[in-house]
Amino acid sequence: MAHPGVDGEPHAATGELRLEGATLALDAVGGELTGRLFAALPRGSVVRVYGMLSDEACRIEGAPLVFEDKRLEGFTMYQWLRTTSLFRQLRTMRKVQGLLGDVLQTKVRARFGLDQCDDALAAVREGTSDGKVLLVPDRLL
């Protein structure tokens, strides 16, 4: 099963995804995708789950945990805020703000008013690789 946004070439013989050179995968989906990311990463890698968009439990094989030194971690901003000093929080926010116009820029493909829900859904079904599709109040169009 293909997952949009997962880069890498499936192995020719097995069809398994391989993410050579990557040591961290960020997973907002959970479910089956967590296991595919976990299997695709090399020895010593980490899959950090920060969302459960699939509404399914993360599914991984146990062998990579034991024999390949891989880790599965959870992340939530609430925990980070509780365990990080105010100084570090401010320093991190300043760094992120500097990335907003460049590295963290979000491409928006289309904006639709609230009365255009059907059109917005049709645009999303066409795909989102060309940018986000936003549903916004009419006054912000």
Image (tube, helix red, strand yellow):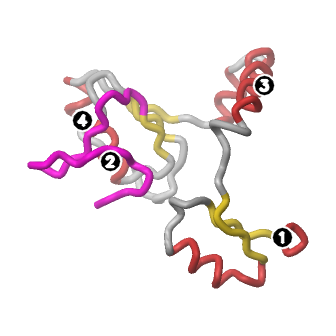
**Mark 1 vs mark 2, CA separation in Å:** 41 Å
Residue 130 in percent (x, y) is at 55, 61
**Residue bearing mark 4:** 62
Mark 4 residue type: Gly
Position of 90 relative to 25 (above/below): above
The amino acid pointed to by label 1 is: Leu
Type of the residue with mark 2 = Arg
**Residue located beneath label 2 in the image:** 59
**Could you tell me what secondary structure mostly forms the magenta stretch?**
loop
Q: Using residue 78 as the reference point, say whether residue 40 is left or right of it.
A: left
Q: Is residue 51 above or below residue 122?
A: above
Could you say whether the residue bearing mark 2 is in a helix, strand or loop? Answer: loop
Residue that carries the numbered disc 3 in the rendered image: 94
**Mark closer to the chain start, 3 or 1:** 3
CB atoms at circles 4 and 1 under 8 Å apart? no
Residue closer to the observer: 53 or 2: 2
Q: Is residue 64 magenta?
A: no
- Precedes in sequence: disc 4 or disc 3: 4
Q: Mark 3: few, some, or many residues within 10 Å (few <14, many ≥20)?
A: few
Give yes or no for contact between labels 4 and 3 (Cβ–Cβ under 8 Å).
no
Which numbered mark, 3 or 2, is in the foreground of this view? Answer: 3
Q: Residue furthest right?
A: 139
Magenta stretch: give its range.
1-24
